[in-house]
Image (cartoon, rainbow, N blue to C red):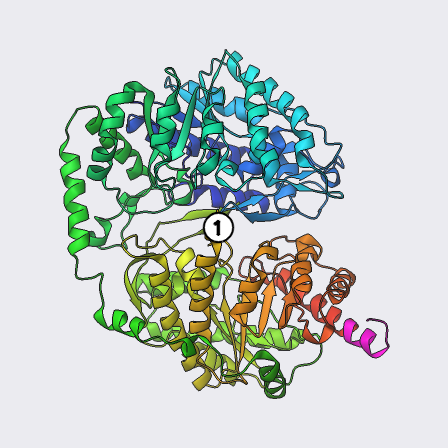
């Protein structure tokens, strides 16, 4: 039985790619060093697949930044602003990703947004009505030839043409992106011929857009595309994931491809329907191993479920990961932070390769003791007393609607908050985090290793907080933050203090580029034994007369950015987290903190991919947020922050959250994302990010003034805040200082213009 995966983590078991990228960007090493480290990581990934006896090794899943950006370069989709001749293709790639590279003129980076319903970010292709596609296959062919030298069958992976168009945006006036399909298909045809010339037998072509609720013209485009791409010299595996095909299944089943891949973890019984429609020579690849979570698979259940189908299809049944393993950590074996019991329940990317091998052996009639080991581990997890807390379950049952509602509406709260906080027009603030310097990281490392005592560490962190407060006062900001020096991550930090969570040592997952996150693991009922942030916030507030925001991560984000237990509904787990956050919010207010930010950057990415399922999710997600925020008095101001998102279709839910102030990322869209709030007539206050913190470029005062003036065309000035578009932890102090000084100057200019009657 053939086994393969759709993709493997790129970053390395200990984030080797991250450090190599940043060294190159910062001029500490050359591109040769970066390229060599990348090559070594690719070979390690391929060897892991060979060691676990996979039938193919997957090629072209590796990327220096993002696989969608790779395809833009492959297809010659380079926005005009990067075609200035100031850098070669290598650095143009990074200029597109981050606005800057070791060579070339700084430019506005390409927009970035979430990859379907994951926390991975991709770079959005920019297309024009007269787009010319030009094949640049160098990267793909180089990696393909490297892999073939290992003497193992290879399977290159490509992003399908329809999904590529679907993910792209118009960089001019809107036009029908499908009008570009004929020329795009000609480019794919050339690519298929090149791969056939290289001796490739199978191509994995990813079309995850197929699981969405598509309009008829997009669905029909698949028939057009794959009829045209049919090539007798090469076999195509049409790959979907993150959901099922639904009503599109029968039409898709008749496409002229050599095989189909379905995500068994998310597509219900689609696999049985599709199996019944296969031609005699078509294969069915099933994503049996979850590529989105880290729990061991129930291999006994899977073998029972698939036994009959395996007998029917024989060698035409392939086993795979449900999606790319990009979304899980690399190797559980190197974990030292997790205890043996919890570790026995888990499975990272490398271990998922072994699960595929075990399942293939069992279905192939070769029994193995590993199946018994898997069964016993799952049984032990279900019986563990660590998972359930009766007090948490009892508290959940006592929640009433009043627990999810502020005592007065925003219109009555707002004047009370303005009086208490004494803020000017266009108040300035930041999203929360300030640079995580080497001194901070070294102190945290020294605490973990025992070189610093808890008291010594607290002193160091307080000095960092003091510096942060003094800096913000010097810049002239109106509402301050303590800078989050003590926090390693906005989710992991809280997870370390909550019951029911566990934190790994090397469980890193790529978010975008060199940015990696280490999602904590929710294994049991969640509660907060004691206050977490109150001491730090109280100290920060003691250093200034200006208001200092308390900074918390919201319940939906604490859920979405973790590996979540799979033995109860996600809504139940989220509400447990909300109660824990509510306790912290109330304690902050009691400590004299009257502006509290509960970040929910993940709330939109939690949407099910099918719009018909959205409302049920939004109901419990917004309810959980309100439970976390509604225990305070009317004059305490609740803020929230959301990352890159399309808000148009969830505006009622955002309004239903009833945050007094929402900050959003809008700078890369030139304030276009704000149109959703204006069209909806959003009633509360908004801080549209006036500069892009993901780019090292210094924002100009005039540019920020222009952006807020654009915002004023949508939102009354009295309800506008001025802030960066995200937290500042990844930037350096020199960049932060210059940017915030300019931002405050922009706010002052706006106030002066207002007094002079120069603005609306």
Q: Is the residue 110 above or below the residue 467 in the image? A: above
Residue 85 location in percent, x, y? 75, 34
- Under tag 1, what secondary structure? helix
- Residue 325 in sight in this render: yes
Q: Is the residue 681 above or below the residue 150 in the image? A: below
Q: Is the residue 253 above or below the residue 441 in the image? A: above
Residue 388 location in percent, x, y? 22, 64
Residue 459 location in percent, x, y? 42, 76
In-image side of 257 versus 217 (left or right): left
Highlighted range, magenta: 750-760
Which quarter of the rendering shows the N terminus? Answer: top left
Magenta run includes residue 754: yes
Please name whichever residue, 566 or 369, is drawn nearer the observer in this view of the structure. Answer: 566
Q: Residue at x 59, y 43 (%)?
A: 123
Magenta run includes residue 539: no
For mark 1, what is the residue? 612
Residue 279 occupies which quadrant of the picture? top left
Which quarter of the rendering shows the C terminus? Answer: bottom right
In-image side of 500 versus 62 (left or right): left
Residue 409 location in percent, x, y? 56, 80
């Amino acid at each position: 039985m053939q086994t393969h995966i759709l993709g493997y983590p790129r970053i390395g078991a200990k984030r080797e790619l991250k450090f190599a990228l940043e060294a190159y960007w910062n001029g500490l090493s050359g591109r040769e060093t970066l390229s060599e480290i990348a090559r070594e990581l690719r070979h390690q990934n391929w060897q892991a697949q060979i060691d676990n006896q996979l039938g193919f090794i997957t090629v072209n899943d590796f990327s220096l930044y993002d696989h969608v950006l790779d395809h833009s370069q492959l297809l010659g989709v380079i926005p005009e602003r990067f075609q200035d001749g100031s850098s070669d293709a290598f650095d143009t790639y990074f200029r597109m990703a981050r606005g800057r590279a070791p060579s070339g003129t700084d430019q506005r980076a390409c927009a970035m947004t979430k990859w379907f319903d994951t926390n991975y970010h991709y770079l959005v292709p920019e297309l024009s009505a007269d787009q010319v596609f030009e094949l640049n296959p160098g990267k793909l062919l180089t990696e393909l030839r490297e892999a073939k030298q290992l003497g193992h069958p290879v399977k290159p992976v490509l992003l399908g043409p329809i999904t590529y168009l679907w993910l792209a945006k118009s960089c001019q006036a809107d036009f029908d992106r499908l009008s570009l399909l004929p020329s795009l298909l000609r480019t794919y045809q050339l690519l298929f011929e090149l791969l056939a010339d290289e001796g490739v037998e199978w191509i994995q072509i990813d079309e995850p857009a197929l699981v969405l609720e598509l309009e008829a013209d997009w669905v029909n485009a698949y028939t057009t595309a794959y009829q045209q791409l049919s090539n007798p010299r090469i076999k195509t595996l049409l790959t979907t994931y993150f959901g099922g095909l639904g009503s599109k299944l029968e039409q898709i089943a008749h496409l002229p491809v050599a095989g189909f891949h379905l995500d068994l973890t998310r597509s219900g019984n689609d696999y049985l329907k599709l199996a019944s429609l296969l031609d005699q020579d078509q294969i069915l690849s099933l994503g049996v191993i979850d590529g989105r979570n880290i729990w061991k698979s129930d291999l006994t259940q899977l073998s029972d479920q698939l036994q009959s189908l395996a007998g029917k299809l024989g060698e035409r049944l392939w086993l795979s990961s449900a999606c790319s393993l990009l979304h899980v950590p690399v190797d559980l074996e190197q974990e030292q932070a997790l205890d043996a019991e919890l570790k026995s329940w888990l499975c990272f990317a490398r271990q998922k390769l072994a699960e595929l091998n075990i399942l293939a052996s069992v279905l192939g009639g070769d029994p193995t003791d590993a199946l018994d080991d898997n069964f016993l581990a799952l049984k032990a997890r279900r019986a563990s007393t660590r998972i359930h807390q009766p007090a948490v379950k009892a508290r959940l049952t006592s929640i009433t609607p009043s627990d999810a509602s502020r005592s007065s509406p925003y219109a009555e709260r707002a004047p009370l908050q303005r009086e208490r906080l004494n803020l000017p027009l266009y108040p300035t603030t930041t999203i929360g985090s300030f640079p995580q310097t080497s001194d901070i990281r070294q102190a945290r490392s020294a605490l973990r290793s025992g070189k610093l005592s808890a008291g010594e560490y607290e002193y160091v962190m307080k000095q960092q907080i003091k510096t942060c407060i003094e800096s913000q006062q010097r810049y002239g900001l109106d509402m301050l933050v303590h800078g989050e020096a003590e926090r390693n991550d906005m989710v992991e930090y809280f997870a370390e203090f909550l019951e029911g969570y566990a934190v790994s040592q090397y469980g890193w997952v790529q978010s975008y580029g060199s940015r990696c996150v280490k999602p904590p693991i929710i294994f049991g009922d969640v509660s907060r034994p004691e206050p977490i942030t109150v001491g730090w916030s109280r100290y920060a507030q003691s250093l200034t007369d200006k208001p200092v925001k308390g900074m918390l991560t919201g319940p939906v984000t604490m859920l979405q950015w973790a590996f979540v237990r799979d033995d109860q509904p996600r809504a139940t787990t989220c509400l447990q987290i909300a109660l824990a956050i509510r306790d912290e919010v109330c304690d902050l207010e009691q400590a004299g903190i009257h502006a509290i930010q509960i970040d929910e950057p993940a709330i939109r990415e939690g949407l099910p991919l099918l719009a018909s399922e959205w409302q049920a999710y939004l109901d419990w997600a917004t309810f959980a947020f309100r439970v976390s925020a509604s225990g305070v008095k009317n004059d305490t101001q609740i803020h929230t922050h959301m990352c890159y998102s399309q808000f148009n279709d969830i505006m009622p839910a955002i309004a239903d959250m009833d945050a007094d102030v929402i900050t959003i990322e809008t700078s890369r869209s030139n304030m276009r994302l704000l149109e959703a709030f204006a069209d909806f007539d959003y009633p509360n206050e908004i801080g549209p990010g006036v500069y892009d913190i993901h780019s090292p470029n210094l924002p100009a005062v005039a540019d920020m003034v222009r952006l807020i003036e654009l915002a004023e065309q949508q939102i009354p000035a009295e309800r506008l805040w001025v802030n960066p578009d995200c937290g500042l932890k990844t930037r350096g102090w020199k960049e932060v200082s210059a940017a915030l000084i300019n931002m405050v100057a922009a706010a002052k200019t706006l106030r002066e213009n207002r007094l002079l009657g120069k603005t609306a």
